[in-house]
Amino acid sequence: MQNLSLNHSQSLVATSILACDFSQLGAEIQRVTTAGSDWIHCDVMDGHFVNNISFGSAFVQAASCHTSLPLDIHLMIDHPDHYLDRFLPLSHSITSHVEAPHPVSHTLARVREAGRLAGLALNPETPLEQISPYIGKFDILLIMTVHPGFGGQAFIPKVLEKIRQAVQLRSQEGLSFHIEVDGGITPETAAVCRSAGANVFVAGTAIFKANDSSVAIREIRGEQ
Ligand code: DX5
Ligand code: ZN
């Protein structure tokens, strides 16, 4: 398994397939792969941790047949550690929520031991301090810019301060984790998040519903 670079100055776009036409899954994934996505973001929801149910490992397995891009799996589920065996073989990165009931350090360690990037996610209302016990144990800090559970929501600007705090923390600790933002990301909101210090941008609606997905991806990445 290739080790994804942890060059957190690199701007990456993780296209969320939650916003795609599920009846055309293969074609949709191929479309956004060709359009220039860096990662494919897979939003797994269990109806407990969030009040929505999306898809599971069988769906992610099907998705993986249509792209060779890294799969960035976002587990919005209780007890993510119970499901790692099913998701690890499919993934390049697996992110679990600090708010979810699970042994956080153990989950992060198992993902890293499998040669994947270990991610830790924070909901908008969760203060950055909540990840203090896990400093150095994750490769991706996923800062939610909407309340998890649904695509197509409005960006929450108050989260920008948490991004700045995360950049400061990373520098103080001499670490090099990605700062990923997720929810309501458009070229405009991506630009303010990039200025605050984020470098991985999850977008579903802004890419799948764009007139030209490749233009949207380039604009979100900050290229034009
Ligand atoms: C929300 C998911 C996000 C969402 C992003 O719980 O984690 O990844 O799919 O969708 P948009 O880009 O439509 O806000
Ligand atoms: Zn997500």
Image (cartoon, rainbow, N blue to C red):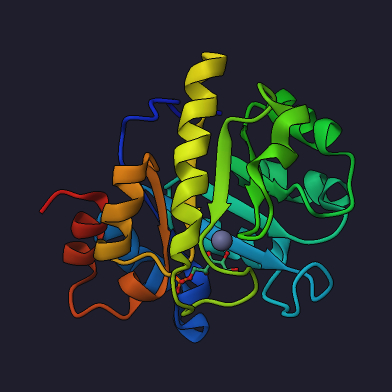
| Left/right of residue 84 with respect to residue 187 in the rendered view | right
| Left/right of residue 97 with respect to residue 211 in the rendered view | right
Is any atom of residue 3 visible in this view? no
- Give the percent coordinates (x, y) of residue 116: 62, 32
Identify the residue shown where x is 72% and y is 30%. Answer: 132
> 156 or 27: which is nearer to us?
156
Image height of 111 relative to 14, above or below: above
> Looking at this rendering, what residue extends furthest in the top direction?
174
Is any atom of residue 148 visible in this view? yes
> Looking at this rendering, what residue extends furthest in the left direction?
224
Identify the residue shown where x is 22% and y is 65%. Answer: 216
The part of the image, by quadrant, that contains residue 217 is: bottom left
Identify the residue shown where x is 51% and y is 61%. Answer: 145
Identify the residue shown where x is 59% and y is 77%. Answer: 150
- Give the percent coordinates (x, y) of residue 196: 36, 43
- Give the percent coordinates (x, y) of residue 172: 52, 17
> 134 or 139: which is nearer to us?
134
The total of numbered circles placed on residues is: 0
The part of the image, by quadrant, that contains residue 11 is: top left
The image quadrant where one finds the C terminus is bottom left
The image quadrant where one finds the N terminus is top right
- Give the percent coordinates (x, y) of residue 180: 48, 46
The part of the image, by quadrant, that contains residue 136 is: top right
| Left/right of residue 16 with respect to residue 79 in the rendered view | left
